[in-house]
Amino acid sequence: MRVLHVIARMNVGGTARYVSHLVSDVPGENLLAAGTVQGSEVEDPVVAELPVVRIAHLGRKIDPINDFKAYLELRKIVKEFNPDLIHSHTFKAGLIARALARRNKKVHTFHGHLFDDSSFSSLAKLFITTAERISARRTDFLISVGERVGVELRDKGVGRNKPWASIKPGVDALARHDKTSARTSLGLPEGLIVGWMARVTAVKNPQLFLEVVRALPEITFAMAGGGDLLDEIRTSAPGNLIILGWSDASLFWSAVDLAISTSDNEGMPIALIEAQLAGVPVIATNVGSNAEVISDGVTGIVTSKDVAKLVAAVRALATDEELRSSMSVAAAHRAEREFSLAAMIESHHKVYLGLSE
């Protein structure tokens, strides 16, 4: 099969790695059509290893003129590549790709949704929801990265009568490093360290993370990632927070003892899977499919976005070395079992073959 994957941008993160595996590993002839990163974002290095064609006017920001130009560019790419199937990823690319004529089968993957993203106004969210409902009608198959994400979309009236599948991300374990050498490379001190790794942007709620850090001055925290709020966070960071910026994930997860995620919205975050593969217990807000990534009380703690509860969770694990140790072993074993790359590839291949019959 000839499959064209379409995405607005391949910024550093789990979605880029998820898509890269589909392009490089699913049997058939695969091509990636991608826009460009914007602002403070950085493109994921995996793109350099993929067959990719650029959609020059496609980016995350809503821009009617450029979006129409991107539609025309994508239409030309489709005509030249002549795919059997167009597989779009994330909102903007899904909107443009599914606006094309229905000559090609169409699959769309929700790597999360935007309903809880505080960077969008109520009017913008209404537009997004309406657009998703209309686009779903023009889609042959819908995929969510996580069961809960799919349920929440259908509750909003998106694709209720369409075939769906929830396909977990397949994740390869990162290289492991000696903790002391990893900390030396990153400039981190000795002692217990709690790590936060994500895009430093509104949906990841770094401000909530800062509240947790301020409430626990006796604990050292490390923050890895970049984004539009990074300068603001640097300015207001307390003394027990070390801000690293973009960092090598294998070094970071080898260096820290606990992971924390304070997101307002998630799909099935690959960073937290990678943390667990490295034997790092995770504390996370109960949003998106986080509770499918973390086994509450076994591989970490899933809690609300309440500061006091997040603080209590961090303190509980930080002060109980035996519990951290048992969660570390359980996290690595569960992540290896649940997030198989082979299973992810096979599931997508079955979807594609089913649509070709």
Image: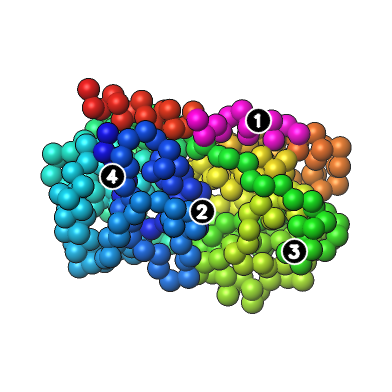
**340 inside magenta stretch:** yes
Q: Which residue is mark 3?
A: 185
> Closer to the camera, 266 or 222?
222
Q: Nearer the viewer, residue 66 or 315?
A: 66
Q: Earlier in the sequence, mark 2 or mark 4?
A: 4
Regarding residue 49, the answer to whether it shows in the image is yes
> Could you say whether the residue bearing mark 4 is in a helix, strand or loop?
strand
Other residues around mark 3 within 10 Å, as few (<14) / some (14–19) / many (≥20): few
Residue type highlighted by circle 3: Ser
Q: Are marks 1 and 3 in contact (CB under 8 Å)?
A: no
Residue 334 bears which disc, if any? 1
Report which quarter residue 28 is drawn in.
Answer: top left
Q: Residue at x 54, y 56 (%)?
A: 204
Judging by the rendered image, the residue that carries numbered circle 2 is 13
Instruction: Report the mark closest to the observer, 2 or 3.
Output: 3
Residue drawn at the location 22% of the way across and 22% of the way down: 357
* Image coords of residue 55 (percent x, y): 27, 60
Pointers 4 and 3 in contact (CB under 8 A)?
no
Tell me how far mark 2 sits from mark 4, CA to CA: 21 Å
Q: Nearer the viewer, mark 1 or mark 3?
A: 3
Q: What's the distance in space between the residues labelled 4 and 3, CA to CA?
A: 39 Å
The reply to whether residue 287 is visible in this rendering is no
Chain-order first, disc 2 or disc 3: 2
Q: Which residues are magenta?
A: 329-342
Tag 1: residue type?
Arg
Q: Give the CA separation, mark 1 to mark 2.
A: 22 Å
> What colour scheme was applied to this rendering of the protein?
rainbow
In the picture, the disc for residue 43 is none
Dot 4 corresponds to which residue? 4
SS class, disc 3: helix
The numbered mark, 1 or 3, whose residue comes first in the sequence reads 3
The residue under the point 20% across, 68% down is: 65
